[in-house]
Amino acid sequence: MSGHSKWSTIKHKKAALDSKRGKSWTKIIREITVAARESGGDINSNAKLRLVVDKAKAANMPQDNITRAIKKGTGELAGGETYEAATYEGYGPHGVAIMIEVLSDNKNRTVSSLRHIFTKMGGAMAENGAVAWMFEHKGVIRASGNLTEDELIENLLDHDIDDISLDDGVFSITCKKQILDLVKKAVESLGLKVEAAQLEWVAKSPIGIDDKNKEESLIKFLESVEELDDVQNVYANIGS
């Protein structure tokens, strides 16, 4: 099936490294708290929370940390900031379309920090809707194991999969966001190890960057945005 997003591949590898270092815990704790606040602390009835808890476990987060984050979200434990979710759009260096998901307790600070990076590194923030039409909000699962790409496609034929690609031993499986949890369970039932399962902004028509210097400056920009404490995820419409 179709190719993969180069930035998505870089992000996945970086996330795996950050998980080993525990660097991703702070951002995941925010996600857990917000998911529990929105739809309750029962992972059996809250699919979003269940996915984030799985993400926390994959990042080797202790169960005590997970439980505290859930209880803060449900109000069983006092303390902690109230984070609000927001999505920002813009154009990065070389006209690349950017979608940014944040969880922030101070949106003015967040916007100011984002605008500083965009301006400093050759991009520009945009109004809501300016670039969102170039993306679709989909479920994305990344998994590894001993199946071939053809075998995985054959086994998932009944699940209305949008796309499957393989890069460096890791499958990227894209599906409609409503069936993400169902497809994740199907992938696990095939004996594959699910390394990540979440909703992502997937570019409808990824563009190529054929100049190495341009590509390096763009990756540096994306990494700088993602390093901000309030930023949860960054997506770009660049392909392989």
Image (cartoon, rainbow, N blue to C red):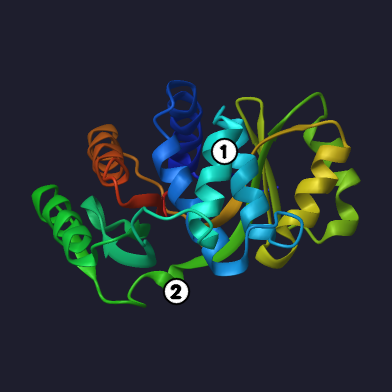
* Residue in the foreground of this view, choosing between 111 and 129: 111
In the rendered view, tell whether residue 238 sits above or below residue 97: above
> Is 237 on the left-hand or right-hand side of 38?
left
Q: To which quarter of the image does residue 35 belong?
A: bottom right
- The reply to whether dot 1 and dot 2 touch (C-beta < 8 Å) is no
Residue 68 location in percent, x, y? 52, 44
Residue drawn 43% across the image and 42% down it:
7
Answer whether residue 240 is visible to the viewer in this image. no
Which dot, 1 or 2, sits closer to the camera?
Answer: 1
Residue located at (50% from left, 45% from top): 5
Q: Nearer the viewer, residue 98 or 21?
A: 21
Q: Amino acid at mark 2?
A: Trp
Direction from residue 91 to residue 101 in the image, left or right = right
Q: Which residue is mark 1?
A: 56
What's the residue at 56%, 29% (across, down)?
62
Instruction: Kindly identify which numbered label has been placed on residue 133.
Output: 2
Could you say which is closer to the camera, residue 6 or residue 54? Answer: 54
Q: Is residue 75 left or right of residue 166?
A: left
Q: Secondary structure at mark 2?
A: helix
Which residue appears at 76% of the width and 48% of the height?
184
The local crowd at label 1, few if under 14, some if 14 to 19, many if 20 or more residues have their Cα within 10 Å, is: many
- Which amino acid, mark 1? Ala
Rendering coords of residue 111 (x, y %)? 20, 63
Q: Position of residue 30 (x, y in %)?
A: 43, 50
Q: Is residue 9 visible?
A: yes
Q: Earlier in the sequence, mark 1 or mark 2?
A: 1
Tag 1, which secondary structure? helix
Q: Residues within 10 Å of mark 2 (few under 14, many from 20)?
A: few
Give the percent coordinates (x, y) of residue 145.
77, 26
